[in-house]
Image (cartoon, rainbow, N blue to C red):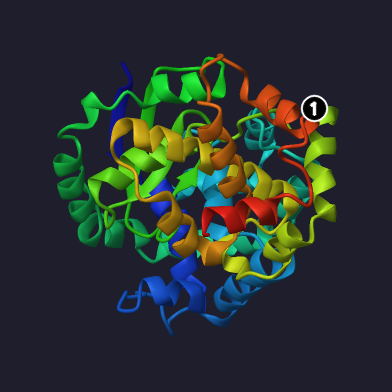
Amino acid sequence: MTKWKIEPSFKYDLCCFMNILTADPYYKEHYPNELNPYENKMPPEVQNAVTSLHKKLKLDNEIIISAWLCLYFSAIDGEELGDLIDAVKDPAELKTNFMKTPYYDEESWGIFISVKDELLQIFQYLKDNGFKEYWTENIKPKIVKRIEAEKQGLDKYDVIAQNEMLLGFKLPSDTITVYMLYYNRPHGIKITGMRFLTSIAWPFKITIRTSAHEMMHPPYDYKNDAELRGVIESFSKDEFVMDKVNNHNKSLGYNTLDGLFEEDCVQSLDQMINENLGVSNDARKRWQESDEGIHVLAIALYQIMKEENYNSRGEVFRDFIIRIYKEGRFTPGKIKEYYDKFYK
């Protein structure tokens, strides 16, 4: 059975608080009445660092700041602002640890190094101006209260068994660690290891759905699988798919073909798991309303899975993608047909 750990985390809530600190309009929609204790109080050099961080990450590189920082800093154990400051000043250990994960690439690491000065300026300001104390007094009690309620009933959901059945391979652990946060909306966030971040604002079923989803990232080895990369890259010729990649709110993420492809693979799988566990939303309603309707590859994959009673043959998910591509069932030019059939 799946073992569950659920706990608060100052470090990850801090990383997510960056969305509030930058006054990004997208996050103001999700936190319309949220107090920013530093609004109009930061000295010019710190405000400049915040503005520069937002520009370099979100505006220039279409990065979700909170999710990206959480992922990087999940490669070190420390929880305090001092630990993050030390890791940014001397990132050797962080880089060594992060390189052992599927998420490392040189371009992204270069971006991390490019915002070192901004992060140091911001983290030191928050350390000197009591953000840990503010969070401990005002935020942590809400999280602890929610965790006590959330723990009830988790044990009956064997998410990992479902993940392994549909992926076709064993996961590295039988334990899922859930960090319950305050500032991460609207993003459920996967970090390194068998861990993810969820929100105190979301109902119990969303914790189960998010765990089913996040434990499957990544569902294949994109960097080292040339055949699979070729399949994914071929969808750049599908105008319907590329319209979704290129023409949506970039704050949602999924701003590259390979990013959307991976997400949609996992969404098709998690919809099957959610149905098996009795916690699903209606698939048509879900993909019609979610993320501006961009998950059209998930809609195609889900229909193929249902047609063939996936995964009754115990197939590795990567092999399933290659097979249905070679069979001509999941290829560029066919995704619009699946979409139209789904919403007929």
Q: Quadrant of the N terminus?
A: top left
Asked if one can make out residue 120 in the rendered structure from this viewpoint, the answer is no
Horizontal placement of 262 versus 15: left or right? right
Look at label 1 and name its amino acid: Asp
Q: Percent position (x, y) of residue 30?
A: 39, 71
Q: Nearer the viewer, residue 151 or 106?
A: 151
Question: Residue drawn 66% across and 26% down?
Answer: 320
Q: Residue at x 54, y 67 (%)?
A: 292
Number of on-image labels:
1
Q: Quadrant of residue 266?
A: top right
Kindly identify the residue that appears in the image at 45 percent across and 55 percent down: 284
Is 151 situated left or right of 187 in this image? left
Residue with the mark numbered 1: 225
- The front one of 167 and 194 is 167
Figure check: 296 above or below 317: below
Whole-percent x, y for residue 206 in the image: 32, 47
Residue nearest the observer in this picture, 207 or 25: 207
Horizontal placement of 339 versus 288: left or right?
right
Quarter of image, res 102 = top right
Secondary structure category for the residue under label 1? loop
Where is residue 109 shown, x and y percent of the image?
74, 46
Q: Please indicate, yes or no, whether residue 238 appears anywhere in the rendered image.
A: yes
User: How dense is the environment of label 1, judged by Cα within 10 Å: few (below 14), some, or many (20 and up)?
Assistant: few
Residue at the extreme bottom of the image, as rendered: 40
Residue 78's place in the image compared with 292, above or below, is above
Q: Where residue 48 sits: x, y (%)?
A: 62, 77
